[in-house]
């Protein structure tokens, strides 16, 4: 048990260091995250919010919060609370700068949510849940913290992502160092179990074209998202992986988007 705790915090720290190294490049590289944030925000346009805290979990540079504020008049002058474990991304988050001096918390989401998010009106998160040790368990915990009438706004890459990477690794007989991503069905079951009703949901596939497979993996690294739970491949293993990447090159993502609500009190 003790060993598991140490390993888990070691992974969080490596994730944080990976994003910190590339923080200055995040917004320029995060085109998929930007597109998904805007799509989620369009779904949320002017939803009725109950009283209670509003937060962006794993906010990074604030892409999702900025998109929500652009579409949702109730949030326009009032940024969501910003929670993240990477100080370097929080440092470039414009919602924490002088125009919007929004509150922030350096927080490891593997520890659940802080007490100030009890009875939340809105918990939003995009491309962050899958970095946690127990995505389904943590998501269930987020649902439990919503006030009656409160909203969950979520985007998360899921287990159908990266088929090209898995195929290349199997053909090259090298370990696949992609993150294990949660199953969309397990996430949706967790949301339903905690009494939330999805108002909208979509399982989308995004493909990034590339001249060859490893270019897509380099792009993940370039935005700081290259941390793996597996040991790194040797140069020889990388070569084999590149040779066996299926044609055409590129990488595809499966991303679950959900807008769900806890029933308001009668
Ligand atoms: C791909 S970025 C997404 C950032 C932002 N939500 C967006 O859509 O651009 C993943 C974020 O999750 C944060 N993160 C990863 N593990 C975390 C943890 N254990 N606790 C809090 N934040 C974490 C990272 O620091 C990073 O900001």
Image (cartoon, rainbow, N blue to C red):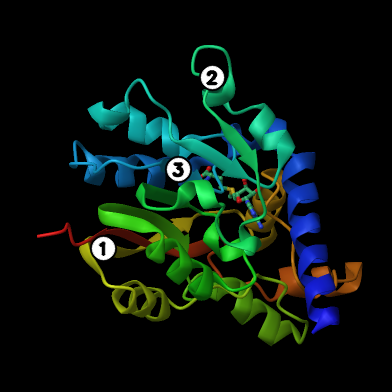
Residue at 28% from the left image edge and 63% from the top image edge: 202
Query: Which residue, given by chain and number where applicable, does mark 1 sit on?
Result: 201
* Residue 85 horizontal/vertical position (percent): 68, 47
Question: What is the secondary structure assignment of the residue under circle 3?
Answer: strand
* Residue at 34% over, 35% down: 68
Lower position in the chain sequence, tag 1 or tag 2? 2
Numbered label tally: 3
Decide if residue 46 is on the left or right side of residue 77. Answer: left
* Residue drawn at the location 61% of the way across and 57% of the way down: 109
Q: Is residue 148 above or below residue 236?
A: above
17 sits left or right of 201 in the view: right
The reply to whether the C-beta atoms of the residues labelled 3 and 2 are less than 8 Å apart is no
Q: CA distance from mark 3 to mark 1?
A: 20 Å
* Marks 3 & 1, CB-CB < 8 Å contact: no
Q: Identify the mark at residue 101; answer none if there is no mark.
A: 2
Closer to the camera in the image, 143 or 220: 143
Q: Earlier in the sequence, mark 3 or mark 2?
A: 3
107 w.r.t. 188: above or below: above
Q: Nearer the viewer, residue 226 or 147?
A: 147
- On screen, residue 18 versus residue 256, left or right, reads right
Of badges 3 and 1, the one in the foreground is 3
Alpha carbon separation for disc pair 1 and 2? 32 Å
Label 2 secondary element: loop
Q: CA distance from mark 3 to mark 2?
A: 14 Å
Q: Quadrant of the C terminus?
A: bottom left
Residue 246 seen in the figure = no
SS at circle 1: strand
- Point out the residue furthest to the left here: 266
Mark identifier at residue 38: none
Identify the mark at residue 55; answer none if there is no mark: 3
């Amino acid at each position: 048990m003790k060993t598991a705790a140490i390993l888990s915090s070691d992974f969080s720290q490596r994730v944080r260091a990976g994003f910190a190294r590339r923080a200055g490049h995040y917004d320029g590289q995060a085109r998929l995250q930007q597109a998904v944030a805007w799509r989620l925000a369009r779904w949320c346009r002017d939803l009725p919010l109950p009283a209670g805290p509003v937060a962006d979990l794993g906010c990074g540079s604030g892409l999702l919060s900025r998109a929500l504020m652009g579409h949702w008049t109730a949030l326009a002058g009032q940024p969501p609370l910003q929670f993240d474990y990477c100080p370097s991304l929080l440092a470039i988050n414009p919602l924490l700068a002088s125009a919007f001096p929004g509150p922030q918390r350096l927080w490891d989401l593997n520890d659940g949510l802080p007490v100030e998010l009890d009875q939340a009106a809105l918990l939003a998160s995009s491309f962050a849940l899958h970095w946690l040790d127990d995505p389904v368990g943590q998501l269930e915990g987020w649902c439990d913290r919503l006030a009656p009438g409160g909203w969950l706004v979520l985007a998360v890459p899921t287990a159908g992502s990266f088929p090209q990477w898995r195929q290349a690794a199997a053909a090259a007989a090298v370990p696949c160092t992609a993150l294990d991503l949660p199953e969309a069905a397990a996430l949706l079951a967790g949301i339903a179990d905690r009494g939330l009703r999805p108002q909208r949901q979509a399982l989308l596939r995004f493909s990034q074209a590339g001249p060859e497979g490893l270019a897509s993996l380099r792009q993940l690294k370039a935005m700081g998202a290259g941390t793996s739970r597996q040991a790194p491949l040797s140069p020889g293993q990388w070569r084999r992986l590149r040779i066996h990447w299926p044609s055409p090159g590129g990488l595809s993502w499966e991303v679950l988007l959900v807008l769900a609500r806890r029933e308001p009190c009668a």
